[in-house]
Amino acid sequence: MTQEMKGLLLEDRWAPVTSTTGFLELGTEQAARAFATWQEGLMTPRGITVEVLPVSGSLEQALSSLLPLTSGETQRHLFIPTRSAWTAYLENGWTGTDAASPMRYMARRLSIRCLRVVTVPHTLRGNQGRYGAVMLDVFGPEQPGKILNYVRSIYAANDGGRWVFGHSGEPFPFEQVEKYQARRLRDRFTFEMLKDYLHHLGLAPFNEDFYLPPGSRAWLIQKTGPFTTVGREYSLEEARAARVL
C-alpha cells in the first residue's frame, strides 16, 4: 500500500473486491430484499434462481461468502450493515465491484441516496501495478428533467497514464472547494479529502469496526442457473495476482 492511501479497509488485502464499494441509505435486510426483487424480475424469465441468504461472522467471513470471484455475469452480491444509516454493497466480480449501475438504479427505485466510493492506490511502475483513483458519486431519487440521477460526482484518477480531475452537481457545504484549484490534478481530490467528505455523510468505511455492529448480520444475494456469459472462477489470491496486487 502506498503512503498516499495508508489506512484503506483491511489494509487493502481484499482488493480488488473492496476497491469500489456501494452504499445505500437504508436498512440492510430491506436493501437486500429490494435488490433481490429487482433481480428476480430480470433473472426468473431466464431460469435463474435468486436467493437471499443471511451471513454471520466477522467482516472477513462475510466477504468470504463472495468467493469464488467470477468473470462473466456477477453471481453474488453482499449487503453489509454498518454503525450508521448506511448499508455497504459489494459483489463477486473478479475485477472488483461495479457499483455505479446498481446504486444509481436503487436510488431511483427506492427514492433514497446511494453512493459509489472508489479508492485505488496509484502503484503503476512500468507495466506493473494499478492506475490510481479516488472517486465519490452520490445518487438520489429521480431528478426532474434529467436523464441520470446524479446528485454529485467528484473524481481524481489516472486515466491510462495521465491524471484527470472533474466534478459535477452542486457542491456540499462541507467540501474543500478551494483545493479543486491545486496545481497537480491528483491533489485536487485526495484520499484524505474523500474520508472527510464521507465522515460528513455519516460514514467511516475504511474502519473495520464500522461494519457489522454486535447482533447484526450481512445478507448475500446468490444467483444460480443458466448464465448467458459463463466465465472462469478465481480465488482472491488469483484475482489479486492477475490485477498485479
Image: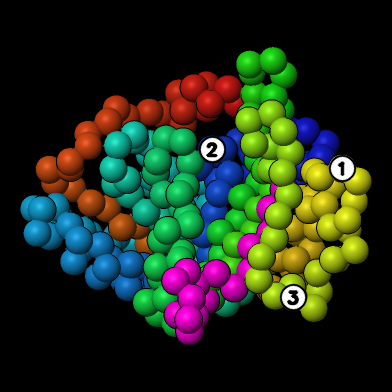
Q: Is disc 2 placed on a helix, strand or loop?
A: loop
Q: Can you tell which mark lies on residue 172?
A: 3
| Residue at (52% x, 21% y) in the render | 241
- Mark with earlier residue (2, 1): 2
Q: Is disc 1 placed on a helix, strand or loop?
A: loop
- Rounded to the nearest angstrom, the CA distance separating label 2 from label 1 is 26 Å
Instruction: Confirm or deny contact between disc 1 and disc 3 (CB under 8 A).
Output: no
Say which of 6 and 153 sits in front.
153
- Mark with earlier residue (1, 3): 3
Q: Nearer the viewer, mark 1 or mark 3?
A: 1
Q: Is residue 12 left or right of residue 190?
A: left
- Rounded to the nearest angstrom, the CA distance separating label 3 from label 2 is 29 Å
Query: Is 41 placed above or below 46 here?
Result: below
Is 150 included in the stretch rendered in magenta? yes
Q: Position of residue 78 (x, y in %)?
A: 41, 56
Say which of 52 and 47 sits in front.
47
Q: In the orientation shown, which residue stands out farthest toward the front?
A: 145
- Rounded to the nearest angstrom, the CA distance separating label 1 from label 3 is 23 Å
Residue named by callout 2: 16
| Residue at (42% x, 76% y) in the render | 108
Residue 42 found in image quarter: bottom left
Segment colored magenta? 140-156
Q: Position of residue 74 (x, y in %)?
A: 32, 45
Residue named by callout 1: 184
Q: Is residue 126 visible?
A: yes
Q: Amino acid at mark 3?
A: Phe
Q: Is disc 3 placed on a helix, strand or loop?
A: loop
Q: Amino acid at mark 1?
A: Arg
Is 186 included in the stretch rendered in magenta? no
Query: Is 124 placed above or below 227 here?
Result: above
- Mark with earlier residue (3, 2): 2
